Amino acid sequence: MSGINPKKLNTSTTAFVTALVVNFGLLLVEVGAFIVLKQKLWRIYSPRTVLPPPHKRAPELPRGPWKWIHALLISPPEDIIQKNGLDAYMFLRFIKLLMVIFLVFTFTTFLVIVPANALHIDSEFRGLDRISWSNITEPKDQVRFAAHVIVVYLLTAFVLYLMRREMLHFTHMRHQFLISKSHSELVQARTVLISPVPDELAHEADLRMFASFVPGGIDKVWTYRDTGTLNDLFEKRQEACEKLEVAEAALLKSTTLAWRKRGELFRKTRSRKLTDEEHSNKEKELTIPPASRELLDELVAPNMRPKHKTGFLGLFGRRVDTIDYFKAEISRLNKEIKDNREHLSKGKFLGSVFMRCNLQLGAHVLAQCLSYHEPLKMYNKWMEAHPKDIVWRNLDDGALEMKSRYLISWLATAGLTFVWAFPVGFIGTLSNLSDLCDKVHWLGWICEASSFTRGLIEGVLPPLLLAIMFSLLPFILRGLAWYECIPRYSLISVSVYRRYYIFLLIHGFLIVTLSSGITNAIEGVIKNPTETVQELSSQLPGASVFFLTYMVTQGLAGAGSALVQLVPLMLHFMRKWFQGRTPRQAYDVTFKMPSADFGVILPRLSLLATIAFAYSVLSPLINLLALISYGMFYLAWKFLLMQVFDQPDEKETGGMYFPMAINNLFVGLYIEQICLTCLLFLKVKQAGVTAVIEAVFMMILIILTACAQVLIHNSFDSLSHYLPMSLATKKMTKRYTKAGQQTDDDDGEIDFFSRYRIRSVRRRIKTTRKLIDGRLGQLEAEVDEARRRKDVEQTQGLNARGVRIEDSRAEATAVAARTPNPFSRKVSTDSKKPKSSSEKQRPVLDAAAPALEDSDSDEDDHAFDHPSTYVHQAWIWLPKDPLGLSEVLVNELKAAGVEASDVGAVMDEKGVVEVTRNPPDEDWSGGHDS
């Protein structure tokens, strides 16, 4: 943006009207395309109605061209919480808040500011400038600026009121979300990540003693330790599995295409030979032979199998058969990883601890306490830690290194913000090369080039390069946030939000404003320094027309583009053609829905609000455009969040983007007030004391706004992050529940922290333990008795009750698996294996396995251990081909010690892979055509 010259592009009413017409026409085209494509491409425009499990599917909207709008608007936005979490709901709530703000802004400024700027004033300005701040130039009209000051006071008070009201609503919804049954039962709801922990607390017993004050006590402790070479082995195996899967799928595709080619050749040959009736009944299709290794080698010669070089990036080294190489490599890594896990010793403590409390409120108490008596010890505590959200590489750094990385990361962000202006400025000059080629001799070839070439360089190249640069920016900022040692991916996105908004504020607003105001005044200042004040006062609001056009572009064309999803539409078919080679890639294309990155989307919407606040009084028309823009955004994003997007649970922050977005609104208020203050001081020469008094009132408003921000921050900061203890009382419970609902019922969600609920939980724990211990003890006694009587009884292998000992052990396993864990969410393990490669149902656990090791809570127990210490090898997922050769390859892999399966994936005769479920080594909860 900073490379665009607003003086050249958008400094006239004609340019604004042209932009309005063009963008409105583009909006009509985009909405028309959406209405047509919506009926045909459900995978792009309504995947939530089909792809998720039945209980998470969204209701289908009416199929008419316009009926869906009414159905979408009247649908309760609270449904989004159940489908996509609180982040999505508060994002939509933020857009709705801006709609209300700019509705009042539009009504007030059009009623007061527009008449004050335009009525009974004789000036040379016409068009948009007629209703703007710049239209008041005569000294006798300076008193009209009092209307601006009064309106700013009223609108600021209104915005502050809405901010406080929305923060109250946010804290209520966040508390309700956190203590809801669906969330409070998750592992992350009761887990606190603490870092850096001193070595004297490196053992679980010490940590339990340290946290003995926590209400409800500690359920489990994970200490993050150095696992030596195990992490490297694990990552190598992950990479090898991916490459082997690609190679196996490529081999199956080659055999399928070779058989199809052979069949076509056979049919052509037979059609030439069948010249009379006696041959007409003979076989016209090749008979599929039994699947075997010989058939595979016959269709694809050994020299045609996938191969690669073992050196750096596959460019150097000896050339090997990819399948044989990685099959042996995975088999070797499986053995090494198993051996390392069996002999895994406690490595060096790396300073990070995960503590899971028995009670959710206990976790929030632990996270808020002052933990250690020395500086830079245990000062970082993160709530809501999800196992899939952990950046393991960022957990092994010391306190000083984390502090230094934080400083370096933000210094690099500041440096990037400064340096970014140079390439953007260079790109901006490309649109002016025709003017420069006369003055710069080495650019003379541009003047001599054809008009088409000049138009390509000046008209197409600059916006293309700008679009590429700004599309790369979020990735660069994400890398800087990762370098900061942030231990969670969701918090990295929050950090990107802060950096991205600062970047857009500087390059997308301040630089454009200064370049259009001060730059225009430079020539006049040099010629006549005494007129500096007057020149600046008339030029500073000069960027308003540019921002009016920018608001039109974003609100009309931008919202329409989000609705039609042109880029996701193109990427979907590109991925289907180029990335659907393996079942996992086909699963991503078929089942995975897109998700919104609020760390990138919210800064853009916040920038529009900042611009609108800054020019809300200087150019009132921007309020109407902002209202239209956010109305379009609300319609588009409500549709996307209800019908298209699926937000991953591990990225959920519980709405923590919302307080940052509210703070961004304060930035807009400050810019508006500071700008008016400066402009009023610049009017002192013309208006005298009146302008001084008005400017002083604006300075007072700045102070009042700052006080309001401090008050709101201090009032809601802790409430936004933690659960209050008042939720444990019945009195507060009744305020959060519907009238007549029982609050002390065992199935209630709010009263989870009451002493009656705690007692109930403790009783269930004791009962469960006694049940398990008694049942296992009884079974062990029966097994021992059976062994003693084995030589005496006639029926060998039977126990005292007449059942096999192995079955008795299996029963013990089943009892342990059926016993509920009142504090843990039931999560499947990767150790589940199917009985055969062709089995289509989810396999069950091996009955002979130890009960405590292979129960459904195994993965829960390993939730915050490094994946290298417990995650099993990812199965090599192959598609079933028409010849049945996938079963041959699966059996070969299993014989080599590599887990594999061909469940849920099919390859047709053209080599196209289709899937009906997720990878078979993961639980399938249903979806699509299940």
Image: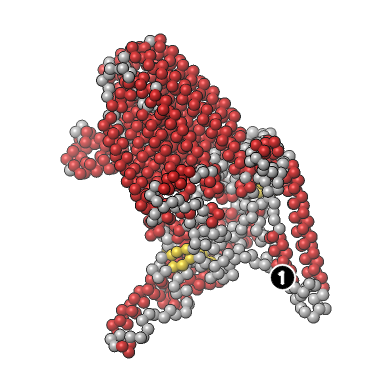
Residue drawn at the location 79% of the way across and 80% of the way down: 794
- Residue 383 visible from this viewpoint: no
- Say which residue appears at 71% left-offset and 58% top-offset: 819
| Vertical arrangement, residue 769 with respect to residue 727, above or below | below
- Residue furthest toward the bottom? 278
Task: Tell me the residue at 35%/31% (across/down).
Answer: 547
Expressed as whole percent of the image width and height from the top left, the position of residue 228 reads: 60, 53
Task: Name the residue that disc number 1 marks.
Answer: 807
Relative to residue 454, is residue 397 drawn left or right? right
- 184 or 631, nearer to the observer: 631
Indicate the quadrant where residue 793 lies: bottom right
- Write down the quadrant of residue 694 in the picture: top left
Label 1: state its secondary structure: helix
Taking depth in this image into account, of 751 and 336 the one nearest to the observer is: 751
Q: Quadrant of residue 487?
A: top right
Which amino acid, mark 1? Asp
Figure quadrant of the N terminus: top left
Q: Residue 802: percent from the left, percent from the top? A: 77, 74
Mark 1, Cα crowd under 10 Å, few <14 / some 14-19 / many 20+, is some
Vertical arrangement, residue 925 with respect to residue 410, above or below? below
All told, the count of numbered labels is 1
Q: Percent position (x, y) of residue 919?
A: 52, 61
Q: Could you tell whether 757 is left or right of 35 in the image?
A: right
Is residue 230 depicted above or below 204 in this figure? below
